Amino acid sequence: MFLSGDKRILLINIDGDKSSMVECATTGRFAIDSSVPNYQEMVSMVMTAYVSGQTSISLHVIETCSSWGNAQDVRGIKMGAMPW
């Protein structure tokens, strides 16, 4: 967890295909920014997935690195086999 001005940024890394990540995401990481309305829910899901060893996780991302200059922005997370 990092502070950037008045925002909190959670950086996450996944084991999986990163070939479609945007060019600005040079670290291969994803960023969740506290200015996003569902920030607390997404952080809770990330921590739950990490602690429980959940392996079926999908991220809904946008094609920017606005939250953290070298990490792709996340706007949603789902766990388990279900459609968006």
Image: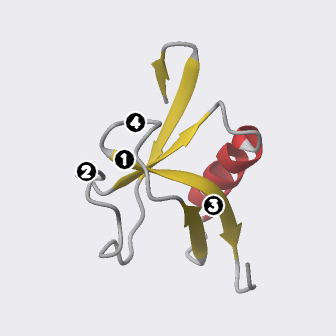
Q: Position of residue 9 (x, y in %)?
A: 51, 32
Q: Position of residue 60 (x, y in %)?
A: 60, 65
Q: Earlier in the sequence, mark 4 or mark 3?
A: 3
CA gap, disc 3 and disc 1:
20 Å
Could you tell me which secondary element the residue under label 4 belongs to? loop
Label 2 near label 1: C-beta < 8 Å? yes
Q: Which residue is mark 2?
A: 27
Amino acid identity at mark 2: Thr
Give the residue drawn at x 60%, y 78%: 56
Placement of the C terminus among the 4 image quadrants: bottom right
| Camera-side mark, 2 or 3 | 2
Q: Which residue is mark 3?
A: 49
31 is higher (above) or lower (below) than 82: above
Q: Which residue is mark 4?
A: 68
Q: Residues within 10 Å of mark 1 (few under 14, many from 20)?
A: many
**Which mark is drawn over residue 14?**
none
Q: Which residue is mark 1?
A: 71
Amino acid identity at mark 3: Ala
Q: Earlier in the sequence, mark 1 or mark 2?
A: 2
Snapshot quadrant of residue 23: bottom left
CA gap, disc 4 and disc 3:
22 Å
| Camera-side mark, 2 or 4 | 4
Q: Earlier in the sequence, mark 2 or mark 3?
A: 2
Q: Residues within 10 Å of mark 3 (few under 14, many from 20)?
A: some
Closer to the camera in the image, 47 or 59: 59
Amino acid identity at mark 1: Ala
Give the residue drawn at x 42%, y 64%: 14
Give the residue drawn at x 44%, y 39%: 66
CA gap, disc 2 and disc 4:
11 Å
Q: Residues within 10 Å of mark 4 (few under 14, many from 20)?
A: many
Amino acid identity at mark 4: Trp
